[in-house]
Image: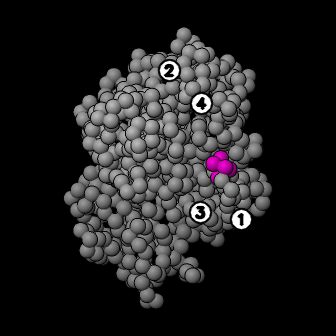
Amino acid sequence: MHYPTWTRAVYHDGSALYLQPSQPYTLGQTLTVRLRSSLDAPISQAFIRLCPDGEQTFVLMQPAERTATEQWWQGQITLSMPRTGYRFWLMTEHGGWWLSAAGMQRSTPTDATDFKLLADYHAPTWVHSAVFYQIFPDRFCDGEPSNNVIAGEYNVYGVPAIARQWGETPQKATGGVEFFGGDLQGISQKLDYLDQLGINALYLTPIFTAPSNHKYDTADYLQIDAHFGGEAALVELRQASQRYQMKLMLDIVLNHCGYTHHWFTAAQADANAPSADYFSWIEHPNEYESWLGHRSLPKLNYASQGLRHAIYGDEQSIVRHWLRQPYAIDGWRIDVANMLARQGPSQLGHKIGRALRRAVKAEAPEAYLLGEHFYDGSNHLQGDELDASMNYRGFTFPTLQWLVGFDMASVWNLAWEDRALLPSEALGEQWLAFLAVIPWQIALQQFNLLDSHDTPRLLTIVGGNRALHQVAVTLQMSFPGVPCIYYGDEIGLQGGGDPYCRGCMPWDAQAWDHELLGFYRRLIALRRNSSALSVGGFQLLLAEGDTVAFVRRSADECLLIVAQRAATNIPSIPMLATGLADGTVFAQVDEASEITIEAGGLQLPQTGIGASIWRMK
């Protein structure tokens, strides 16, 4: 359907420019809700549509200030529910229009795309200025060789443990059983490097006792693996990271455990053991539900009250234990959160998710609760479960497919791999679709990554093209949410899928790409010091050809981000929807270039593949 031009300039988002006062919000609080339109918008009346306790109601908005280019409207609402959904009903002489988080439309939108406000929501507001750094501990730094795994020291699933020399290439055939010696002491020793990079938050893959190098096969949730330095090394890291004012998030596997865990060995030995109902037995003792059929990873059964108490319910439960002193971690990353507490007819995922959140927030209200989710995690992101998901579908995959046609199907060896470049229009659609269905408060907390221990490395994905690499990182640092860098990406580390993406961090600076490292440092500094990038709104302006452009805007800063995936002409960027007048000047960040809005548009110089950030003067 072709919509009139004026509809493109009717705008609202959940940022502080449109909701006053700004968050945090409380039950019973009255807010002023604002809407912006162009002067030629034929709006005769504007209403805020709400649905308190399930029955819709409309609040009449009043015309507010009028500028040379904009007409503002505003109305007041009172937050009577923990989650309040709202959208706008706009009357014109040619009929009514709806504005929801999905945009303007003549047809009635579903409630799923309503703008959403969360009241009495314990938000980890520190993440707004966070830049995370993901570390795979065995491969980052060997700080204490005395705790290294010795070749043949023990068997890992029937295979003797393999000790490798630092810097050797991981081998596919022995990926999970080879050890390079990285540990928590090594991380503590390299915090100065991370501080100089600009990192202020660490995300460690699992460090609990487990036979493998990746530790996703937990043998004891209350013990730090001795080969990583044990509990003393975690205390040392916690104290050191606090001196650098760095947050610390740990990874925990609650969907399954390893088959060497004492819960499972006791349950196998005795069908009446206290932990027997922690697992789903098909035929005791050797047939049981496991993660994706991997017998070494028995799935945990959350129908068990005893399991719930052990994981989160008791005062001394696992998730509470590590949130307390002397560890006092700042967040949990929940492995395969999409599968947690889901087994055929027993679909307890949301119930357990809500209970887990209550336990975490009771112990540490500012803790960050992140869930791994390779798909659509929006039903876990409504304010009563996760604070965020790993934003693979809302950011990572569409961005990489737009850049180079990367499809995770290739990693999963699926026959239907799609290597075609994602059209720019489709990239914009996917970004907006995933933003539209979650509260803006949570959108600002989404965990935006470009690669991880589960994917090929970014530089490998883009075929070694430094320009495309920098486009990807610029988008990551400027998109709504919290950026996370995978260790070594900043110095040009490459590697294909697991285990090659888990290579050792090279500490010989002569092997580093120092130009790339400098690029990361500058961009991280901008991200951490920009109110527009940390809490500002997001407005997509252009997605066509090989170009995407959007604005991030806060009360005191307006940034324009333009990304170009190929050396083709950059179209004029339409600025009418921003409400900014002709003559408004933007200066390129860290450069001397300036551009000016003329005839409602901005024309950028042609620079080939690349991304640029422009600040309104």
Label 4 near label 1: C-beta < 8 Å? no
Query: Dot 3 lies on which element?
Result: helix
Q: Nearer the viewer, mark 1 or mark 4?
A: 4
Q: Which mark is residue 228?
A: 2
| In this view, 23 is above or below 5 | above
Q: Nearer the viewer, mark 1 or mark 2?
A: 2
Label 4 near label 3: C-beta < 8 Å? no
Query: Dot 1 lies on which element?
Result: loop
* Residue at x 75% of width, y 41% of height: 464
CA distance separating discs 1 and 2: 49 Å
Label 2 near label 3: C-beta < 8 Å? no
Give the x, y percent position of residue 249. Answer: 44, 34
| Residue farthest to the top, as pictured | 146
Q: Nearer the viewer, mark 3 or mark 2?
A: 2
**Mark 4 crowd level (few <14, some 14–19, many ≥20, 10 Å Cα):** many
| In this view, 48 is above or below 152 | below
Q: Which residue lies under the disc numbered 4?
A: 176
Q: Nearer the viewer, mark 3 or mark 4?
A: 4
Query: Dot 2 lies on which element?
Result: helix
Amino acid type assigned to the residue bearing label 4 in the image: Gly
Q: Is residue 513 visible?
A: yes
Q: Which residue lies under the disc numbered 1?
A: 545
What range of the chain is rendered magenta? 409-413
Colour scheme shown: one colour
Q: Nearer the viewer, residue 135 or 34?
A: 135
Q: Which mark is residue 230?
A: none
Closer to the chain start, of discs 3 and 4, is 4
Closer to the chain start, of discs 1 and 4, is 4
Amino acid type assigned to the residue bearing label 3 in the image: Gly
